[in-house]
């Protein structure tokens, strides 16, 4: 373990951070987001959608849609014109499965902060995959949604979904998160940083980029898997390659106790974590091996 800690400290030292052993009980190091009011829960339930009719403006038949959909890896399941585009990963399958459960963990607390919808808000979805969360943000009323994604095929897939569903005011760009700059993309009321932090070897730099493109007073939503090793601030891992991982390299896997300090170090002035609510959540969220934070710039 001493060698691992030495490697981690050397990797982090240029950024002013150090991997160290944390003693004591699991502590998020910040306050918790309060439960959303029942009316916001109901509004969020009415806004969610992953099943769509085929838009008349799509310019494709149902058969053509199925043919085009077959070219892609589906990380998130969708239903188009009654055709189930099931997730390829077993853990993500089912229209009412993991990702719908994640939505009800993430979005009701977010909407409670923004008056019950995202109307009038701009949203940035970092590492957007095929745009599942970008689409939910637009359905929640966001005026402008930008999804950035390193994978060109994922961006093509996202644009296919926009064409098939007819959703507007969503733009996708091929862009690595390390290239995020305020002068290139602007600033956003809400920035989504979901399922990315635990893949990174430079977490502080990435969160500083996130802060730069979050408006003053805006909120960054950071959702991440967490290290299971007790008492470790950051765990050094070799990242697991798969079809949606474009950076097969060393990563610094955060612990439950390290995320809030990382966000504060990156310059966010307020940090809160979203505790699990109820039993209708994936197991990793219920056990807090994956958790969500709200960071206010």
Image (cartoon, helix red, strand yellow):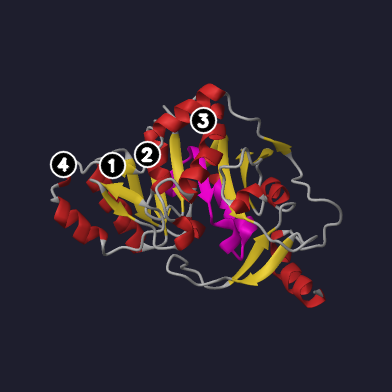
Q: Is residue 50 left or right of residue 199?
A: left
| Residue 239 seen anywhere in this rendered image of the structure | yes
Q: Which SS class for mark 2?
A: loop
Q: Is residue 14 above or below residue 42?
A: below
How busy is the neighbourhood of tag 1: few (under 14 within 10 Å), some, or many (20 plus)?
some
Q: Which SS class for mark 4?
A: helix
Residue 272, percent from left and from top:
67, 38
Q: Residue furthest bottom?
A: 3
Q: Is residue 225 left or right of residue 79?
A: right
Q: CA separation, marks 1 and 4?
A: 13 Å
- Residue tagged 3: 111
Q: Are marks 2 and 1 in contact (CB under 8 Å)?
A: yes
Q: CA separation, marks 3 and 1?
A: 23 Å
Q: Residue furthest front?
A: 279
Q: CA separation, marks 3 and 4?
A: 30 Å
Residue 49, numbered label: 2
Residue 57, numbered label: 4
């Amino acid at each position: 373990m001493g060698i691992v800690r030495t490697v981690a400290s050397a990797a982090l030292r240029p950024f002013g951070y150090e991997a160290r052993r944390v003693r004591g009980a699991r502590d998020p190091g910040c306050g918790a987001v309060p439960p959303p009011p029942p009316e916001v829960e109901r509004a969020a339930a009415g806004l969610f959608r992953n099943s769509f009719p085929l838009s008349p403006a799509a310019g494709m038949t149902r058969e053509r849609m199925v043919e085009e959909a077959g070219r892609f890896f589906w990380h998130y399941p969708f239903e188009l014109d009654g055709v189930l585009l099931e997730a390829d990963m077993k853990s993500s399958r089912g229209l009412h499965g993991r990702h719908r459960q994640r939505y009800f963990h993430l979005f009701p607390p977010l909407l409670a902060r923004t008056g019950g919808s995202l109307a009038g808000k701009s949203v940035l979805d970092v590492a957007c995959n095929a745009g599942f969360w970008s689409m939910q943000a637009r359905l929640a009323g966001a005026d402008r949604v930008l999804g950035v994604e390193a994978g060109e095929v994922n961006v093509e897939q996202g644009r296919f979904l926009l064409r098939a569903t007819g959703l507007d005011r969503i733009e996708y760009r091929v862009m690595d998160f390390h290239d995020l700059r305020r002068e290139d993309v602007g600033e956003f009321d809400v920035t989504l940083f979901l399922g990315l932090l635990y893949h990174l070897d430079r977490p502080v730099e990435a969160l500083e980029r996130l802060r730069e493109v979050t408006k003053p007073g805006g909120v960054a939503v950071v959702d991440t898997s967490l290290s299971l090793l007790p008492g470790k601030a950051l765990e050094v891992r070799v990242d697991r390659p798969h079809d949606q991982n474009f950076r097969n390299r060393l990563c610094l896997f955060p612990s439950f106790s390290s995320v809030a300090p990382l966000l504060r170090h990156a310059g966010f002035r307020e940090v809160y974590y979203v505790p699990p609510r109820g039993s209708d959540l994936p197991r990793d969220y219920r056990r807090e091996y994956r958790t969500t934070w709200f960071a206010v710039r």
